Image: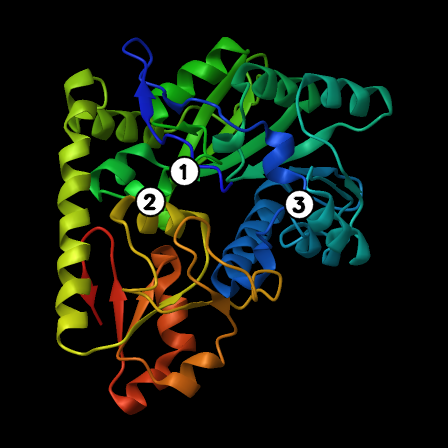
Amino acid sequence: MEPFYPLEAYVCDSCFLVQLEEFEPPESIFSDYAYFSSYSETWLQHSKTYVDKMIRMLGLDGRSSVIEIASNDGYLLQYFMEAGIPVLGIEPARNVAKVAIQKGIPTEMVFFGTETAKSLVSSGRTADLLLGNNVLAHVPDLNDFVEGLRILLKPHGLITLEFPHLMRLMEQSQFDTIYHEHLSYFSLITIDKIFDTHGLTVFDVEELPTHGGSLRIYVKHKSSNDTRQPVSDNVYRIMTKEAEAGLGRIETYLTFSEKVRSVKRDILKFLINAKESGRTVVGYGAPAKGNTLLNYCGIRTDFIEYTVDRSSYKQGRYLPGSHIPIVSPSRIKETKPDYLFILPWNIKDEIVSQMGHIREWGGKFVVPVPKVTIL
């Protein structure tokens, strides 16, 4: 039987951490992982820009050590390697990690936490730069993970982490970003408390456009006396924005459900009107967020006939729950649909650029979140 699980987000009325109940252990989710970072040109460019910035900022060279947690297929570490900087990836999904190893990127196939950190330190591995992009939300034991970061970081080293910003998620009704693989959802208010508990200081933060709005935090040891890294005004500015948005009040979180129901009605109205007008709708992408959206809205092949994805690993399969078939993007030219429904809306600009040829037959793009928009 195809398994279904409840999808309910809970919020702590003390620290305002938003979490899901855990139904599947990480070993079940990540043993054979379907997401390969290198298929997104947008994400590769984002990573290259980050690498160039960190090399300049920290003066990294052949004597430095860069360690990435959840390094996927080596999408980011490849750029440090090209610059002659020693790297190590930590990636529990064996099928993905093997792709990185084939590229020549040293990769440990293990889940990260205090035990992994202690093992690496005992073997002489510590980090000048320790990074993790979109991994913190996946961690079932936050305290163990953050303590592992503290252990693995050199005394004057730097941690950077990127994660979707809870404030943007709520403002933009990005309910499809909530799925079982993401166990936690963070504001800077909450993140600062977590790291402070483990003897680490969030001294700077950037707002990024990725994944509908993300934060990149910069973290150091509390004991570090590096005067080049004072606590930035950015930290206070974003915390103030969060407070003004009500993220320090439980009532704010309780109003989110009605906003989500409104988006659902908006999506269904569009699809019903399109079908009643004799228009064809197909999907683009097979992301995890798309499965939340489709299953919550009750969308099946009666509304979206198929979806396409560039990843050959996903082609020939079906989206869970909705059973919408996943095929190659070449099918678009063959069937000439009226609408291309973009499921990974966070990279809509890249998709519109790639698939611009649908305009030749009058095809249009549909972005479902935060409200249905036709391009």
Disc 2 and disc 1: Cα gap in Å? 7 Å
> Which secondary structure, mark 3?
loop
- Residue 203, position as x, y percentages in the image: 45, 25
- The 10 Å Cα crowd at callout 1, few under 14, some 14 to 19, many 20 or more, is many
Residue 210 showing in the rendered view: no
Q: Which of 272 and 345 is in front in this view?
A: 272
Is 315 left or right of 93, judged from the image as shown? left
Residue flagged by tag 2: what amino acid is it?
Asp
Q: Which of 224 and 312 is in front in this view?
A: 312
Q: Mark 2 points at which residue?
A: 176
Res 374 label: none
- The 10 Å Cα crowd at callout 3, few under 14, some 14 to 19, many 20 or more, is few
Render colour scheme: rainbow
Residue flagged by tag 1: what amino acid is it?
Tyr
Q: Mark 1 points at which residue?
A: 179
Q: Mark 3 points at which residue?
A: 32
